[in-house]
Image: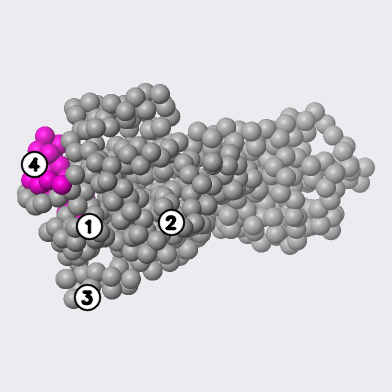
């Protein structure tokens, strides 16, 4: 049985590409922040991502390149790994759908569902979008095009195996009704019910014979497993489901959170739950379908000329500035706009002027007035109690926001305390206190309060801006990770160095 102190979070496994853009990174950056936050709270976290390497699209691209599909994906999968490393993504598992453990599990799942009668053999005739690896009915098309990517679909006719989605329709509806938090946000849930489930679920084609790059069906070698049944199984194959050692599956399943883009939520809230029901397995606690990052109202795309490799932004502005912008700028669940101009504006206003300036001048004053040794002499005034209350309440505010996945609001709360700390400097005027020897103890108390506000904020920023958090604590020269105000700590400060420089807008 799953341990209550575990937390299993997943992103979709990504199509391996040499051309990832910042929109591809959005899901993974958010998932990383949530995973890091849960670790900060003391959870045993398993955070999984990976690459989805089968399907007709891959086979076609490999032929164009003159190599085998496996050689093709081997060459470019490293690009995804390098990108996640450059973004400081702290995943625990990286699964490739070509991994042996995954291939064997998918074959066993297919066999089990076939033996139960939930997969049966028939003939498929219908519409298929190769780029999305998706089957569609004519009524689901938008102006005759794929409703997800807007590209042409083509008619296919071939022998195929089918998964009995229709058999589980009523059970799925009942589950969604009894678990109102299962599909989030609410708009996605309504879309799935009204547009896909209520009109009636058709059985899903789950094998192909028109190409060979996929996981073979063990009892019918002319067929390979449909890429979505293959891909969705990764969430349990990586945990050892149906293997000799399923201890991780027993420990972490069901998942706490599947984090997906809105364009693939249909598979995760209809096909995947029905697969799990057919396997007699518990469903994940929540599937959250977030919006897209867009530029000038359009999806980021190389063909539209608004594409840049995310590593270029990291090189220009720093990894934590990019992470901060993506996490802070977008109200989670909605589409958000990405632009370099807005990234620069956020960096200058929030990171350089607010956070960076506060850290630099507080540590500088501690070094200047007390040779870097600052302790709490508790010469307090009324203003201190209010400031300390705000510091102590921050951990509760952040927890409340993160529990409902309002990541942007959690970060905003931290930066509000940082702004309050800058205001506290203006209100207490340390430079005036420093002119009077009789006020030295009061000055040291003020600086101590400021240092504690910085320390608490730095600890709470760790999930969102991990390198920045480490650097601030290094300059504070402290190992304390408590998330509330400590009244008896003694600081021996390091020399300050700028954490964020203002970016000149040319």
* Badge number at residue 243: 2
**Image height of 225 relative to 312, above or below:** above
Image: magenta residue range: 121-145
Name the residue that disc number 1 marks: 219
Residues tagged 2 and 4 counted as in contact (Cβ below 8 A): no
Q: Is residue 123 magenta?
A: yes
Name the residue that disc number 4 marks: 144
Q: How is the image coloured?
A: one colour
Q: Which corner quadrant holds the N terminus?
A: top right
Q: Secondary structure at mark 2?
A: loop
Q: Is residue 160 visible?
A: yes
Where residue 319 sits in the image (x, y, percent)?
50, 59
- Looking at the image, residue 344 sits to the left or right of residue 267; the answer is right
Where residue 423 sits in the image (x, y, percent)?
67, 38
What separation in Å lies between label 2 and label 4 (alpha carbons)? 44 Å
Q: Residues within 10 Å of mark 1 (few under 14, many from 20)?
A: few
Q: Residues within 10 Å of mark 3 (few under 14, many from 20)?
A: few
Where residue 150 sits in the image (x, y, percent)?
16, 46
Q: Nearer the viewer, mark 1 or mark 2?
A: 1
Q: Nearer the viewer, mark 3 or mark 4?
A: 3
- Looking at the image, residue 350 sits to the left or right of residue 390; the answer is left
Residues tagged 3 and 4 counted as in contact (Cβ below 8 A): no
């Amino acid at each position: 049985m799953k341990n209550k102190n575990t937390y299993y979070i997943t992103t979709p496994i990504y199509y391996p590409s040499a051309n990832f853009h910042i929109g591809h990174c959005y899901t993974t950056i958010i998932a990383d922040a949530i995973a890091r936050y849960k670790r900060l709270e003391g959870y045993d976290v398993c955070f999984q991502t990976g690459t989805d390497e089968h399907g007709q699209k891959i086979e076609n691209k490999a032929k164009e390149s003159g190599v085998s599909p496996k050689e093709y994906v081997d060459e470019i999968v490293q690009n995804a790994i390098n990108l996640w490393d450059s973004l400081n993504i702290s995943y625990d598992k990286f699964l490739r759908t070509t991994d042996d453990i995954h291939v064997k599990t998918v074959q066993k799942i297919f066999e089990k569902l076939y033996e139960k009668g939930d997969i049966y053999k028939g003939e498929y005739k219908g519409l298929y979008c190769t780029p999305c690896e998706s089957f569609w009915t004519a009524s689901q098309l938008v102006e005759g095009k794929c409703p997800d990517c807007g590209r042409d679909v083509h008619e296919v006719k071939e022998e195929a195996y089918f998964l009995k989605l229709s058999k589980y329709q009523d059970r799925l509806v009942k589950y969604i009704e009894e678990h109102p938090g299962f599909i989030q946000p609410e708009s996605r849930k309504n879309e799935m019910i009204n547009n896909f489930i209520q009109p009636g679920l058709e059985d899903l084609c789950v094998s192909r014979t028109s190409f060979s790059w996929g996981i073979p069906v063990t009892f019918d070698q002319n067929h390979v497993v449909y890429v979505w049944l293959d891909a969705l199984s990764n969430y349990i194959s990586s945990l050892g489901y149906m293997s000799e050692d399923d201890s991780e599956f027993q420990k972490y399943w069901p998942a706490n959170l599947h984090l997906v883009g809105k364009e693939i939520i249909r598979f995760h809230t209809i096909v995947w739950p029905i697969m799990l029901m057919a396997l007699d397995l518990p469903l994940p606690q929540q599937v959250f379908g977030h919006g897209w990052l867009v530029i000038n109202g359009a999806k980021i795309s190389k063909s539209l000329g608004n594409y840049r490799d995310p590593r270029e932004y990291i090189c220009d502005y720093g990894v934590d500035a990019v992470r901060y912008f993506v996490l802070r700028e977008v109200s989670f669940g909605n589409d958000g706009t990405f632009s370099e101009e807005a990234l620069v504006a956020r960096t200058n206003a929030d990171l350089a002027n607010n956070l960076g300036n506060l850290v630099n001048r507080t540590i500088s004053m501690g070094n200047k007035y007390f040779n870097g040794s600052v302790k709490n002499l508790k010469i307090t005034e009324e203003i201190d109690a209010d400031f300390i209350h705000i510091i102590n309440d921050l951990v509760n505010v952040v927890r409340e926001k993160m529990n409902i996945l309002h990541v942007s609001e959690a970060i905003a709360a931290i930066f509000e305390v940082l702004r309050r700390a800058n205001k506290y400097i203006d209100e207490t005027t340390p430079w005036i206190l420093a002119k009077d020897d009789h006020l030295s103890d009061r000055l040291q108390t003020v600086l101590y309060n400021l240092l504690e506000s910085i320390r608490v904020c730095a600890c709470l920023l760790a999930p969102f801006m991990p390198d920045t958090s480490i650097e601030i604590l290094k300059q504070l020269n402290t190992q304390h990770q408590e998330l509330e105000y400590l009244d008896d700590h003694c600081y021996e400060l390091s020399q300050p160095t700028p954490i964020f420089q203002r970016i000149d807008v040319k």
